[in-house]
Image: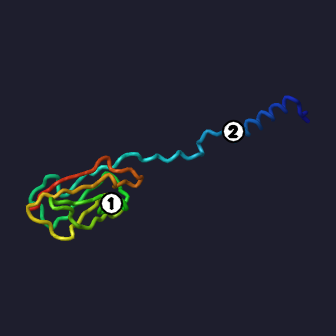
Amino acid sequence: MKKFTMQNAYLLFALLLTVFMTGCNNNNDSNPAPPVTDTTAPTVTLTVPNNTATDVAINTKIIATFSEDMASATITGTTFTLTEPGGTVAGEVTYPAGVKTASFAPTTALDSGIVYTAKITIGATDLAGNPLAVDKEWTFTTG
């Protein structure tokens, strides 16, 4: 029968200490990485009609496509407008979530031969709350 010696006690103590220290290791492997914060400002990547387009149909919808999903509550008649020399054009703004495209439908036909200005302001934000980098403005002439 083997005797329990002091050397064996030290080995047992070292083994238990190693197991304990390994269990208490705080190397963050088990902690999830913090979420990446979106700080990129969205942009308008496409407009219909195009800037400076001519002979645009008087019953056309005005469309803007964004670089990323936008917060639909921020795409409104205040942030997406259409104006003519006489003032603001009445219309309905829609932005279905997840499609990155907003539209402005005038409530009545546009007048022929008029230069219209469409504008989306920096009040429009993406889902992270980042506003447009700059106001987007474009013009077109009806035919």
Amino acid beneath label 2: Thr
Residue in view at x 80 percent, y 34 percent: 13
Give residue 20's quadrant in the image: top right
Of 3 and 31, the residue lying toward us: 31
Q: Check disc 2 and report the residue beneath it.
A: 22
Amino acid beneath label 1: Ile
Of 61 and 118, the residue lying toward us: 118
**Label 1, residues with CA under 10 Å away: few <14, some 14-19, many ≥20:** many
Kindly identify which numbered label has been placed on residue 75: 1
The kind of secondary structure element at disc 1 is loop
What is the residue that sits farthest to the top in this orientation? 7
Q: Is residue 44 above or below residue 73?
A: above
The kind of secondary structure element at disc 2 is helix
Compare marks 2 and 1 and give the one earlier in the sequence: 2
Residue 117, position in %: x, y?
18, 56
Quick check: 24 left or right of 91?
A: right
**Label 2, residues with CA under 10 Å away: few <14, some 14-19, many ≥20:** few
Q: How far apart are the two marked residues, 2 and 1, measured between alpha carbons? A: 53 Å
Quick check: 71 left or right of 141?
A: right
